[in-house]
Image: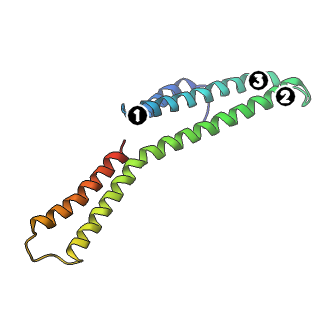
Amino acid sequence: MFFSESKLPTYPAVVKLGALSLGADDGEAQIMLINSVKDVAFALNNLINVTKLASGKNIVDPEMQKLKESAKVMVTNVTSLLRTVKNVEDKSQHGTHALECTIESIAQELQTFNNGQLSTNRTTPEELVHVTKQITIARSKVVLGGQ
């Protein structure tokens, strides 16, 4: 079973480790993640308490309505947490994707420069400037993508 009351005290530590793995530069994502997990924890605590009160009651009892509402809040908070995790993951993958695009761009420029062949001629300064300009542009895109 994934969740048990005996493991409940370890969840905050695991969440903090997960948030710290994002790195010190991404404090906003850490805060979003911790707040989302905190919302889920509060909703779970409420759901447990309401379930205890509703246990054994008739379906039309007001406690059962409270249980239904509490379950809806729990689902909403878990959905929100999953969206937050996805957003943080997408943001962290952005830099990796930019780097992959840069590598591909450099490879294409080199192939264009060499016309698909290894050059036997010496490279002129003008040709070198042309190639380095494209590399500088690609590097700038990586830096912007990593921010």
Q: Quadrant of the C terminus?
A: top left
Could you tell me which secondary element the residue under label 1 belongs to? loop
Q: Quadrant of the N terminus?
A: top right
Q: Label 1, on which residue?
A: 26
Distance between mark 3 and mark 1 Cα atoms:
36 Å
Distance between mark 2 and mark 1 Cα atoms:
41 Å
Residue drawn where x is 45% and y is 44% of the image: 91
Label 1 CA crowd tier, 10 Å (few <14, some 14–19, many 20+): some
Residue drawn where x is 57% and y is 31% of the image: 36
Residue drawn where x is 68% and y is 36% of the image: 76
Amino acid type, label 2: Gln
- 33 or 28: nearer the viewer: 28
Q: Label 2, on which residue?
A: 65
- The mark that comes first in sequence, 3 or 1, is 1
- In the rendered image, residue 53, in percent from the top left (x then y), is placed at 80, 21
Q: Pointer 2 and pointer 1: residues touching (CB < 8 Å)?
A: no
Q: Pointer 3 and pointer 1: residues touching (CB < 8 Å)?
A: no
Q: Label 3, on which residue?
A: 50
Mark 2 vs mark 1: in front: 1
- 85 or 46: nearer the viewer: 85
| Structure colour scheme | rainbow
Side of 128 where 38 appears, left or right: right
- The mark that comes first in sequence, 3 or 2, is 3
Amino acid type, label 1: Asp
Could you tell me which secondary element the residue under label 2 belongs to? helix
- 45 or 57: nearer the viewer: 45
Residue drawn where x is 42% and y is 48% of the image: 93
Residue 7, can we see it? no
